[in-house]
Image: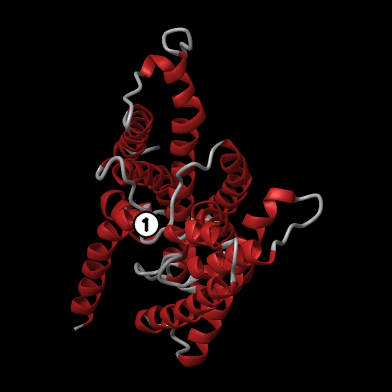
Amino acid sequence: MVKKKTIFAYTSSIIFLLFSVWLGVSNGSVDVPLSALWDSSTNPSLYNILWSIRMPRVLLAGLVGASLAIAGAAFQGLLKNPLADPYTLGVSSGASVGAVATIFFGISIPFIGSFTLPIFGMLGALLTLMFVLSFARLIDRSMKMETLILTGVIFSSFLGSCISLMIALTGEELREIMGWLLGSVSMRGWPYVTMILPFVIIGSTILWLNRRELNAMMYGDERAQSLGVNVKKSKYAILTGGSMLTGAAVAVSGTIGFVGLVVPHMTRILWGADHRHLLTLSFLNGASLLIICDLVSRTILAPAELPIGVITAFIGAPVFSYIFYKQRRSKG
């Protein structure tokens, strides 16, 4: 039987998401009434602003936020570490290298076209995560929290230098590459929503299908094995799904930090650590958070616009510090 707390969690998260979408499409340099959603005859220009500019931007922000949040929840569950997320593990940096390299070298896979960018971002994310985990295990087989974080920092620094090298060597692509690195969903339009959507659906489905396995692995690999979980297969599936989501998100929006850290952690505090619900609730709340952050980024200094990564960093850095402090105090 579904608990009342769980019903309330889903209801409040969905309401908050709908409220965030309404705020995102209604507010900006021009206020757009909700009636413009369905009535084009009232004011054609407002109808055009809403459906050509605001709606794809809000949906893209929601999809990116949802992707990073559910990926962060899966990584934290898999590694049994509340500080694990695509940003701190260096996965976002790997995805950025994949995306920037695609732009820098002008790579385009035949028959795939625009999907080349998210695919290379996904591959960069997956390879980086594999290297981070392998290197951390080589140093410390218990893979302590500090080891993972430091390994993520090392790989992020190295990958950041690779990106800097490509920027130094680039010419006409400089503006486009800098646009990715700043992190933004501005002026992307419906093609980018179409680009990320298949990866969000596939990646989220992979993680959701492994929700029970994540619960079992929270108690250790041996315990999960005794419960009938194919640990190796589940780990690869979770890593693939999380990297797919991170790579696609970074490919369409650039590096946006801390969403995958803050949202799952706060959701876990509010509604519990059961991955049967944590993944879905993180997905919904991640979408809401990034829609709100995008709204703040384009209105707080209007008509100028801040990169959305600046807003998420202002929120995420104090939360990261608090979690790290709490973890150290509990061990001390």
Q: Nearer the viewer, residue 267 or 25?
A: 25
2 lies above or below 119? above
Could you tell me residue 328's position as x and y percent? 23, 79
Which percent across, then down, holds residue 118?
62, 55
Q: Is residue 155 left or right of residue 2?
A: right
How far across and how far down the image is residue 124, in percent?
60, 68
Q: Quadrant of residue 186?
A: top left
For the residue labelled by badge 1, is the local secondary structure a helix, a strand or a loop? Answer: helix
- Of all residues, the one furthest to the top in this rendering is 41
Answer whether residue 249 is visible to the viewer in this image: yes
Task: Choose top left, top right, bottom left or bottom right for residue 304.
Answer: top left
From the viewer's perspective, tell me whether residue 249 is left or right of residue 307: right
Vertical relation: 289 (above or below) 310: above
Determine the residue positioned at 36% across, 61% down: 258
Outermost residue toward the right in this view: 110
Binning the other alpha carbons within 10 Å of mark 1 as few (below 14), some (14 to 19) or many (20 upward) gives: many
Position in image of residue 193 (x %, y %): 56, 40
Residue 210 picture quarter = bottom right
**Residue lying farthest to the bottom in this orientation:** 139
- Residue holding disc 1: 309
Q: Residue at x 18, y 84 (%)?
A: 332
User: Which residue sits at x=61%, y=73%?
Assistant: 127
Q: Nearer the viewer, residue 276 or 263?
A: 263
305 up-or-down from 29: above or below: below
